[in-house]
Amino acid sequence: MPQFWPWWNCGNLRVGFRNFSKSIVLTFTSLLDGFTLQGVNLLITGFLGVAVLPIFATLRTVANTAMQSTMFLLNPITPDLVRFHVGKEWRKLTATFQLFWFTTGLFINFGLLAGLFFIEPVYKAWTQGKLAFDRSIFVWLVIGVIFRTAGAPFSVLLQSLNRLRVQFIISFLRGTIALVLSLLLLSRFGLAGIASSLAVAELVCSILIPYYFTRIEFNEMEGDLPKKDIISAGFSALACSLGLGSFAFFENIINPLFISSLIGCLVIAIMQWTALAPEIKNKLLALLGPRHIARS
């Protein structure tokens, strides 16, 4: 476009420096995330040896598969989050949160519990039996993913709004909590101690802190966060975590705690469905066909 040439025409050093400062914050945030990941790997190799790193990395890859599914559900509604925030349509924003927590509660949390029946055979087939499957490590890693999924609407909203200072604070605290706790628990619990440290870091930095800053955003819109839906999403994550815990502590998957957790996730998903707005229900049912709409 000719009006923008030459590029230095009508330049503003103050604006340029401000944008440069913002990019520096974003760069440091990315470096912190990478430092956390590499720092955990260095702790494992330094204290436990290089031989155990593939086990941890492979189990973490399996656990993060659920996070990919979460982003698959969240990415299509991300533009709506920004649009509703800009328009101060906080009720539509909360409705979007409700939809996300319902779908993840049903497909992610309930799906993770159902997947425990065949995760070990699939893992052994994938690794050709060369890497051991440690239930406790796997469970802690998946619990971390569950926490990250529950707080994903908060985190994605803050990222989409370019709240760089908030992102830096979250990345800094996530790395600090993960590495410090890992150092404290490593000698006694080994890889499970590191995995549990990552789960605690996700609880604080994917749910608690993003919730605090998201509440500030809603206050500026003179709106209210959906407390009941946040509580139901929290109970769904708790039920799934307890079911996963039973997988680590009991040899037999079918135990009272697991069955209770499975039923709990399903019941909470039904409650979340009933809380959805009628127009959202109709859109979801439309994906299944007009016959389901007629029944509803």
Image: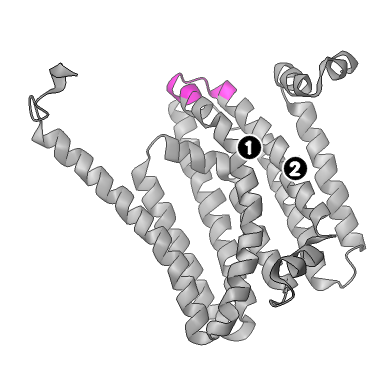
Q: Which residue is mark 1?
A: 73
Q: Is residue 18 above or below residue 56?
A: above
Specify whether 96 is left or right of 156: right
Residue at the spot x=64%, y=63% of the render?
Answer: 141
Q: Is residue 170 above or below residue 224?
A: below
Q: CA distance from mark 1 to mark 2?
A: 10 Å
**Residue 264 image position (x, y, % from top left):** 84, 47
- 257, 12: nearer the viewer: 12
Residue at the spot x=61%, y=81% of the render?
Answer: 190
Q: Which residue is mark 2?
A: 107
Circle on res. 148: none
Q: Is residue 91 magenta?
A: yes
Here the colouring is one colour
- Displayed quadrant of residue 1: top left
Specify whether 153 is left or right of 240: left
Prevalent SS, magenta region: helix
In the rendered structure, which amino acid carries the disc numbered 1? Answer: Leu
| Picture mark count | 2
The residue range painted magenta reads 83-92
**Residue 270 image position (x, y, % from top left):** 82, 35
Q: Is residue 6 visible?
A: yes
In the rendered structure, which amino acid carries the disc numbered 2? Answer: Phe
Q: Is residue 98 above or below residue 278?
A: below
SS at mark 2? helix
Assess whether mark 2 and mark 1 are in contact (beta carbons under 8 angstroms).
Answer: yes
Q: Is residue 98 magenta?
A: no
- Displayed quadrant of residue 286: top right
Of labels 1 and 2, earlier in sequence is 1
* Crowdedness near tag 2: few (<14), some (14–19) or many (≥20) residues, C-alpha within 10 Å: some
Residue at the spot x=79%, y=67% of the render?
Answer: 120
